[in-house]
Image (cartoon, rainbow, N blue to C red):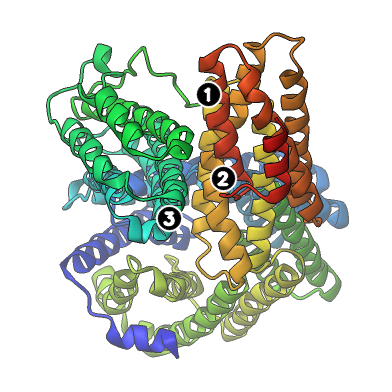
């Protein structure tokens, strides 16, 4: 019902018309060339154009290359294994199921667009191998594999040529706009956090949105190398800038938490805080080009402003204000680092300033869900085994189509938390496609004799479906409807459609996805709540790991992956549990304080080994490890939290005995941040008061 309303309310805009018309022209060009070359299955040429279609030319080009590579890999595997296993069907089926499961596992671990290569390599192998088996008496193995590769290459080339020459829409300007907006959002949030104490509770969700946006831009940046725009070739420096930008999120959350603590004690300090903000805001809004040697430059009034702020505040706010000062100083320096990298990118300079530690790794330091990847691979394995076994045991001639469709649907939507609703939409669209094939094949095509007539009768349906592509709620219907119709029509130079074959293939193309739906529902599907619980467990494990990481490049990369995980958590909009929504909210706060865990290790090294506070800090680290291990395992942790707070109080009471005042103050700041942001305790309980009083 909802989809029907969306279709009725759909009104294509100018860009929808341009995109649909361009893609239709590319598809017809690919079909014409496939006919001219007398390729066995021209449907794969035109179908490829529609599968890789995207309004942005860079995305189309990159997906084209990934599709060619995936198809090539699938063709090589099929040529290598089919002669060896073709006469042992069960062993052949086992190998193909294992191969697709492995490829899907690798694909689900890689959250970049290149994951398309491994996924396509998996189910392309199945398609080629099963077609070889079906047509074993008429086509050689090599010819079948090469034919499929050529058909897809024709589609890829036609799509790339049309998308880059006819009204090309580059992704570079879109990325530039998104980056500028994200940088502006951090500036706006900084202003709001320091000036608007009434809405502090809402900022963490907004900050979570920024982490989600940076993850999206990170993926979009991959396509910049495949188009001619102002940001061409800037993928690596842009992704590095995004890594640095995510660190700002931790700074902003930390500031928000310190201000909440200060407000609970007394709010008179905010009158002087406005002066601090005014000078910092003016300093950050300076549009002059930033020089590398000026990265750590601070506003000239920075020290004097904070001295006045501390003087005006109550004594018990001193440590918190010093923590706020440290967070703001880091925020200013990180903002300037981001601006410097962005300035260089806009000037076409892809080098990174020497003073900035690069966070980019060979393989992106993003969140990877091995559990989902394993379950996805296992579900694909089971689906292919069941579908192919049905084909073998039944002896049904069209069973190969059932097995192929099962393999395809086992892979294409598995990255979703629960692919079942989308697969049901796929089946629904496939039913509509069968109706469209029947209308075209038996009502329209008997009157078509030339290629231009074929284009004319296909144009209304194909262009309408393509106009739905840029609108995500409608893509789930339009793509399978269009592909099902095109594949079902099975265009060939000597066109003939047998009624029995048509109905057999139609039934098989519906049963295959049904098998996928059933197996994925049992093995792979999980609710957003379960997904969030699993990601939170990984988050708590990452907090524990931060306890033992020295501050440096490795820690920054670890923090980057934690913030990316927060972005993934904030994308789970359908979470029903209020407690889980609260945990997501707290996870961002916890991530902002993991730097204080590394400072504990750093401060231990600056203290004499014989001092009792060293062993107390080590006990505190163990208590933190125990606390977050309990949260990771979803075990009761109230008693462990009390032991942790006791350990905190013990270390707090021992800080007054530290001779090095700088170390003592930094230790007090970190202890306060750990209590507030990791233990979520803004007040000292009675047991801790006794310990502090006894000191």
Compute the Cα span from label 1 to label 2.
Answer: 15 Å
Using the image as rendered, state which of residue 186 and residue 244 is in the foreground: 186
Q: Disc 3 and disc 1: Cα gap in Å?
A: 75 Å
- Which numbered circle lies on residue 518? none
Q: Quadrant of residue 230?
A: top left
Q: How many marks?
A: 3
Is residue 366 visible from the viewing direction of this image? no
Q: CA distance from mark 2 to mark 3?
A: 71 Å
**Mark 2 residue element:** helix
Q: Residues within 10 Å of mark 3 (few under 14, many from 20)?
A: few
Marks 3 and 1 close (CB-CB < 8 Å): no
Label 3, secondary structure: give it: loop
Q: Residue at x 43, y 46 (%)?
A: 262
Classed neighbour count for the residue bearing mark 2: other residues with Cα under 10 Å, few (<14), some (14–19), many (≥20):
many
* 156 in relation to 671, above or below: below
Nearer to us in this view, 392 or 62: 62
Q: Answer with mark 2 or mark 3, whichever residue precedes in sequence.
A: 3
Q: Nearer the viewer, residue 549 or 67?
A: 549
Q: Which residue is mark 1?
A: 666
Instruction: Residue under label 2, please give it.
Output: 676
Where does the N terminus fall, quadrant-wise?
bottom left
Residue 401: x and y, percent? 65, 69
In the image: residue 54, left or right of residue 633:
left
Q: Is residue 240 left or right of residue 140?
A: left
Q: Earlier in the sequence, mark 3 or mark 1?
A: 3
Rendering coords of residue 60 (x, y %): 35, 49
Query: Disc 3 designates what residue?
Result: 38
On the image, the x and y values in percent for residue 624 come to 72, 38
Left or right: residue 517 versus residue 552 is right
- The residue at the point 47 percent across, 45 percent down is 113
């Amino acid at each position: 019902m909802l989809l029907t309303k969306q279709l009725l309310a759909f009104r294509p805009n100018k860009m929808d018309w341009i995109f649909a018309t361009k893609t239709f022209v590319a598809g017809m060009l690919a079909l014409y060339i496939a006919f001219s070359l007398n390729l066995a299955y021209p449907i794969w040429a035109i179908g490829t154009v529609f599968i890789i279609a995207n309004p942005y030319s860079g995305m189309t080009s990159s997906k084209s290359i990934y599709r060619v590579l995936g198809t090539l890999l699938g063709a090589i595997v099929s040529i290598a294994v089919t002669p060896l296993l073709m006469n042992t069907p069960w062993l052949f089926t086992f190998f193909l199921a294992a191969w697709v499961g492995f490829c899907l596992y690798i694909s689900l671990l890689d959250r970049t667009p290149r994951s398309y290569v491994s996924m396509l390599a998996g189910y392309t192998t199945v398609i080629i191998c099963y077609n070889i088996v079906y047509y074993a008496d008429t086509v050689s193995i090599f010819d079948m594999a090469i034919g499929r590769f050529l058909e897809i290459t024709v589609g890829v080339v036609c799509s790339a040529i049309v998308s880059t020459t006819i009204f090309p829409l580059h992704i570079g300007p879109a990325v530039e706009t998104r980056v500028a907006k994200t940088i502006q959002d951090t500036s706006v949030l900084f202003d709001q956090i320091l000036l608007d104490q009434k809405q502090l509770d809402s900022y963490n969700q907004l900050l979570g949105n920024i982490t989600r946006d940076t993850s999206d831009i990170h993926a979009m940046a991959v396509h910049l190398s495949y188009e001619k725009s102002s940001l061409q070739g800037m993928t690596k420096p842009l992704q590095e800038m995004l890594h640095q930008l995510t660190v700002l999120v931790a700074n902003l959350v930390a500031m928000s938490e310190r201000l909440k603590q200060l407000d609970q004690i007394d709010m008179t300090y905010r009158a002087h805080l406005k002066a601090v903000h005014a000078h910092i805001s003016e300093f950050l809004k300076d549009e002059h080009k930033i020089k590398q040697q000026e990265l750590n430059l601070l506003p000239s009034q920075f020290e004097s402003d904070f001295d006045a702020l501390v003087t005006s505040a109550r004594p018990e706010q001193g440590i918190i204000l010093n923590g706020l000062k440290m967070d703001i100083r880091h925020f200013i320096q990180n903002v300037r680092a981001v601006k410097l990298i962005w300035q260089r990118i806009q000037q076409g300079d892809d080098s990174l300033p020497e003073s900035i530690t690069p966070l980019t790794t060979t393989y992106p330091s993003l969140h990877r869900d091995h559990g989902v990847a394993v379950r996805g691979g296992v579900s694909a394995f089971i689906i292919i085994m069941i579908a192919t076994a049905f084909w073998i045991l039944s002896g049904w001639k069209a069973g190969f189509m059932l097995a192929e469709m099962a393999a395809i649907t086992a892979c294409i939507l598995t990255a979703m938390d629960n692919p079942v609703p989308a697969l049901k939409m796929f089946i629904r669209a496939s039913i509509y496609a069968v109706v469209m094939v029947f209308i075209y094949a038996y009502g329209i095509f008997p009157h078509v004799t030339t290629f231009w007539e074929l284009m004319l009768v296909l144009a209304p349906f194909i262009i309408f479906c393509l106009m739905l592509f840029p609108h995500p709620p409608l893509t789930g219907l339009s793509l399978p409807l269009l592909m099902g119709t095109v594949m079902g029509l099975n265009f060939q130079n000597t066109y003939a459609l047998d009624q029995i074959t048509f109905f057999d293939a139609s039934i098989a193309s519906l049963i295959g996805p049904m098998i996928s739906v059933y197996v994925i529902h049992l093995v792979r599907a999980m609710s957003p709540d379960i997904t969030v619980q699993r990601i939170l467990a990984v988050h708590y494990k990452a907090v524990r790991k931060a306890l033992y990481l020295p501050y440096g490049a490795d820690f920054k990369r670890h923090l980057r992956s934690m913030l990316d995980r927060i972005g993934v958590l904030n994308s789970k909009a359908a979470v029903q549990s209020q407690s889980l929504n609260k945990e997501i909210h707290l996870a961002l706060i916890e991530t902002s304080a993991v730097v204080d865990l590394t400072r504990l290790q750093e401060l231990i090294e600056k203290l004499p080994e014989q001092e009792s506070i060293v062993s107390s800090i080590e006990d505190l680290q163990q208590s933190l490890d125990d606390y977050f291990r309990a949260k990771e395992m979803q075990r009761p942790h109230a008693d462990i939290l009390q032991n942790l707070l006791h350990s905190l109080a013990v270390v707090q009471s021992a800080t007054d005995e530290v001779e090095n005042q700088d170390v003592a103050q930094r230790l007090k700041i970190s202890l306060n941040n750990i209590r507030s942001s990791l233990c979520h305790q803004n007040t000292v309980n009675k047991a801790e008061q006794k310990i502090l009083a006894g000191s």
